[in-house]
Amino acid sequence: MHKIICAIFRDVTVSIPFPMSDPSQSSRVRDFLCPDFLGEDLSALHPKTTLMGFKEWIIPQDKVFFDLLEDQAELVLKAAELFKVMIDDYDTFEVKIKRMRALEHEGDDIVHNVVQKLNKTFITPIDHEDISKLTSLYDDVLDYIDAVANKIFLFKLKKPDGVIKKFADLIVKQVREVNAAMGHMRKIRQKEIEKRFKAVHKLENEADDLFDHATVELFKEKDPIKIMIMKDIYEYLETVTDMCEDVCLAIQDIVMKNA
């Protein structure tokens, strides 16, 4: 049993309350704690064993981070769905812009909460830096959805065109797929996450094609102000789809590290 605990300790990020000038010092700390580590292959104990599973069994971990990530995911979906409603029912756009801003503020609160808990938590279900990166990436998606809604409001767009409507639909579909992948992180369901990533990637390719075609058509316009405004909006919307794919890639990386 001691050997198993030592094997797990090798993979645990140990937070030391004082700076270490030599990066190898952290590994020496683990060597001191587990001097008889023999490098056993944990998967030999059971064919379906994962390192994360053993860490969960041996060492109590704060699972609140999964809850916070899923709360953030739900918030991003609310923002994406709200944006689609605002575009489809454009007469209510100005009224709903305040709700969008409120969602963005809620997202900032979640990020702040995650950072605070990371600073106070010794052992986390996944690495501290991975939690921080994933939270930051998905917060960027929420920020950009709020930003593009605000641009449309400030530019006083008379009516959203078909391109904006298609982008709004693609973003909702992407966020749903990303959230599904997020939901499979707790149990490290690699096949399901890979399936969701492929769906997100396919939607991102559709968004790229939409942007390229829309830009070509836009430059046929004679009004330079309209060209500038619409190009700015299109670019923000296309960036949202890129960011969704970045979030899914981060989820994939985390799962590969912990499988």
Image (cartoon, rainbow, N blue to C red):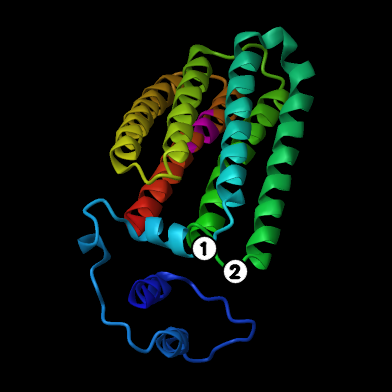
**What is the quadrant of residue 209 in the picture?**
top left
Q: Which residue does the image show at 75% across and 40% down from the upper left? A: 105
* Helix, strand or loop at mark 2: loop
Numbered marks: total: 2
Quadrant of the drawing holding the N terminus = bottom left
**What is the quadrant of residue 70 in the picture?**
top right
Which one is nearer the viewer's eye here, 67 or 135?
67
Q: Is residue 235 magenta?
A: yes
Which residue range is magenta in the image? 234-239
Numbered circle sitting on residue 122:
2
Q: In the image, residue 56 lies at what x, y percent?
A: 46, 58
* Helix, strand or loop at mark 1: helix
What distance separates the C-alpha of mark 1 from that of mark 2? 13 Å
Q: Is residue 51 magenta?
A: no
Mark 1 lies on residue: 129
Q: Which residue does the image show at 48% across and 34% down from the upper left? A: 179
Q: Which residue does the image show at 40% across and 84% down from the upper left? A: 34
Amino acid type, mark 2: Phe
Between disc 1 and disc 2, the foreground one is 2
Q: In the image, residue 183 lies at what x, y percent?
A: 47, 37
Numbered circle sitting on residue 247:
none
Taking 183 as reference, is 255 above or below it?
Answer: below
Q: Label the magenta part by its dominant secondary structure.
A: helix
Q: In the image, residue 6 lies at what x, y percent?
A: 38, 77
